Image (cartoon, helix red, strand yellow):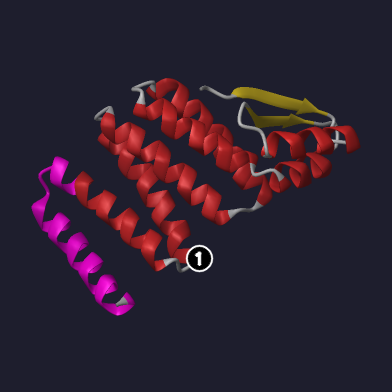
Amino acid sequence: MEKIKWGIIGPGNIANNFADGLNSSHSGQLVGIASKNDDRRQIFGDKYNISRHLNSLGVTLKSQGNYAQGIIYYTRSLKISEELGDKHGIANSLENIAIIYFEQKYYDKYYDYSMRSLKIREEIDDKLLILNSLLNIGRYYIEKKDYDLAMDNYSRVLKISEDVG
């Protein structure tokens, strides 16, 4: 069963109670918040993981081949993550956008978004996510038939994997 997507205008006490109910609901999902006060909107969105839900919707749409809608949801997730300063969320949204571009054979856009994601993942020093980004970037080099760079990239993956254990 597809969930009903809800948006909230004015994140006050009633909205908090409603959002709490949606979190335990099997039929509804909070996907957006609007407020005159940016700080209250950000706090509310952070509390209810709006960015993560938007990414999940993007994954579903991408899986259905609806790339344009997937990009829209990933971009919304990216914007929220940027506003919150959530580097993990930013990197994940960038990587998800990159994957859609790869599937559409827009390899240069794919590379750009993958590199942006990798840079953030390196800043936060998340080895497993760095490996994921590097593996994806290796795909780019293979598609471009730049096998030397692919080998260099995959050698880096191997080195990090050995260091992580």
Image height check: is 16 above or below 46?
above
Query: Disc 1 on helix, strand or loop?
Result: loop
Report the magenta stretch's main SS: helix
Residue 117 location (% of width, % of height) = 43, 51
The residue singled out by tag 1 in the image is 124
How many numbered discs sit on the rendered protein?
Answer: 1
Residue 115 location (% of width, % of height) = 37, 51
Horizontally, is 38 left or right of 66 in the view? right
Mark 1 crowdedness (10 Å alpha carbons): few <14, some 14-19, many ≥20: some
Horizontally, is 162 left or right of 2 in the view? left
In the rendered image, is residue 104 in sight?
yes
Picture residue at 25% right of the left edge, 76% below the top: 162
Q: Amino acid at mark 1?
A: Ile
Picture residue at 45% right of the left edge, 43% below the top: 94
In the rendered image, is residue 106 in sight?
no
Identify the image quadrant of the C terminus.
bottom left
As rendered, which of 152 and 17 lies closer to the eye?
Answer: 17
Residue 51 location (% of width, % of height) = 60, 41
As rendered, which of 45 and 1 lies closer to the eye?
Answer: 1
Q: Quadrant of residue 98?
A: top left
Image height check: is 68 above or below 92?
above
Picture residue at 53% right of the left edge, 48% below the top: 90
Q: Quadrant of residue 49?
A: top right
Residue 52 location (% of width, % of height) = 56, 42
Horizontally, is 72 left or right of 34 in the view? left
Looking at the rendering, the stretch of residues picked out in magenta corresponds to: 141-164
Horizontally, is 41 left or right of 49 in the view? right
